[in-house]
Image (cartoon, grey):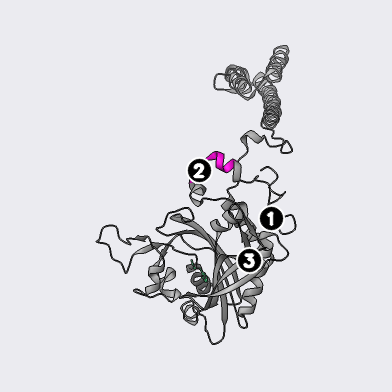
Amino acid sequence: MEDMNLLESEIMAQIAGASDLKHLDDVRVAVLGKKGVLTEKMKTLGQMEEHLRIETAKKLNTLKNKIEEAFGAKKSALEDAALNTRLQEEKIDVTLPVRPEVQGRIHPVSKIFEEVFAIFGALGFEVAEGPDIEDQFHNFNALNMPLNHPARQMQDTFYIASKQSEPFDMESAYVARTHTSGIQIRTMENKKPPIRIIAPGRTYRSDMDATHTPMFHQVEGLVVDKTTTFAELKGCLSDFVKAFFELDNIPVRYRPSYFPFTEPSAEMDIGCLKTKTELKIGAGDDWLEILGCGMVHPNVLRAGGIDPDEYQGFAFGVGIDRLAMLKYGIPDLRTFFESDLRWLKHYGFAPLDFSSLTGGLNGNGGSLR
Ligand code: PHE
């Protein structure tokens, strides 16, 4: 009996003294394992006289239960402590200010996309997307540009063989999309009117100088409904440029133009003042071309599975890089894609300056620039 009490207090002291989960497990093995003290004690039961054996077995079992309970309690206490230490060590104070020396910058192109989303989002447009590597049906044919249509020469297209193993076949080749207009078709294929979408994306043409790079960015717009008119197109795009350049009044004009997928087609210019050293938007006698637009050609509606006798629509395509150059006074487009950190530091935006119509398109006025 004495012996048993001593054993109990010794084991309990060892459990209480375990400093971590590994230590506790060592103690458990030393007590309850195959060769543990308690296990060894159990083994002696066999040699005992019957009435002593029954009594000792009872006591040993009670002791074993107590010890197991103590192990369980200690184990969860140690687990809690381990979790608390981890929480303490891995604590991140999200209210701490960002260290400016490690802060990244938002590229002007991303910023302009955000601004355009904020404006058209407020006008009730949804965002649609399409693939960069496009088939010719969506990039050309469905847009009223069948193979050998002269308008295909308007764009310096990168073609991609559909099967690498075979000789190049012009008809089945894919293209690096030359514009985002293919998303007009993809949208019409998947959605019934009324349609009101903008489609942002990278676009590709074989061209390179101060205002052209082989990869650039566009945002497409498409509205299709029963009564959509050219007047709505004008209202929508005038509202867009006013919001975008943050000017209450901005002269706009629409010059007749040609795109195979719109009829009539137009190019939209905004009023500006050009001097030798400065370009001022919104005032003066000069004009600056800003986007292409028009009423969706009936053939395009048909290709998208929409009946042109019932529906009509307008579409537009804006060059995002050009907007960035104009709005933020960046002279050479090629510098956009050189990944020069000094350039990004100069022209980039603080990551937390979200664009919104109410809070300002440049967040806090581009506060960290
Ligand atoms: N896709 C034309 C371009 O890249 C722009 C455009 C889009 C014109 C939609 C009219 C309507 O030049």
Q: Locate the C terminus and report the quarter of the image it occupies.
A: top right
Characterize the local packing of mark 1: few (<14), some (14-19) or many (20 or more) Cα atoms within 10 angstroms: many
Cα separation between marks 3 and 1:
27 Å
Q: In this rendered view, identify the residue nearer to me: 36 or 274.
A: 274
Going from N to C along the chain, the mark reached first, 3 or 2, is 3
Is 26 inside the magenta-drawn segment? no
Q: Is residue 173 left or right of residue 361?
A: left
Going from N to C along the chain, the mark reached first, 3 or 1, is 3
Give the label, 3 or 1, closer to the camera: 3
Cα separation between marks 1 and 2:
24 Å
Residue 88 sits in quarter:
top right
Q: In this rendered view, identify the residue nearer to me: 77 or 352.
A: 352
Q: Is residue 147 left or right of residue 102?
A: left
Q: Which residue is mark 2?
A: 339
Q: In this rendered view, identify the residue nearer to me: 79 or 365.
A: 365
Q: Amino acid at mark 1?
A: Leu
Q: Tell me where residue 4 appears, x and y as whole percent.
A: 70, 15
Characterize the local packing of mark 3: few (<14), some (14-19) or many (20 or more) Cα atoms within 10 angstroms: few
Characterize the local packing of mark 2: few (<14), some (14-19) or many (20 or more) Cα atoms within 10 angstroms: few
Give the label, 3 or 2, closer to the camera: 3
In this rendering, the answer to whether 94 lies above or below 272 is above
Q: Which mark is residue 285?
A: 3
Q: Secondary structure at mark 2?
A: loop
Q: Tell me where residue 331 appears, x and y as whole percent.
A: 54, 51
Q: Bounds of the magenta span?
A: 338-345
By secondary structure, the bulk of the magenta-drawn segment is best described as helix
Q: Which residue is mark 1?
A: 361
Q: Tell me where residue 58 appears, x and y as whole percent.
A: 69, 25
Looking at the image, which residue sits at the far front? 276
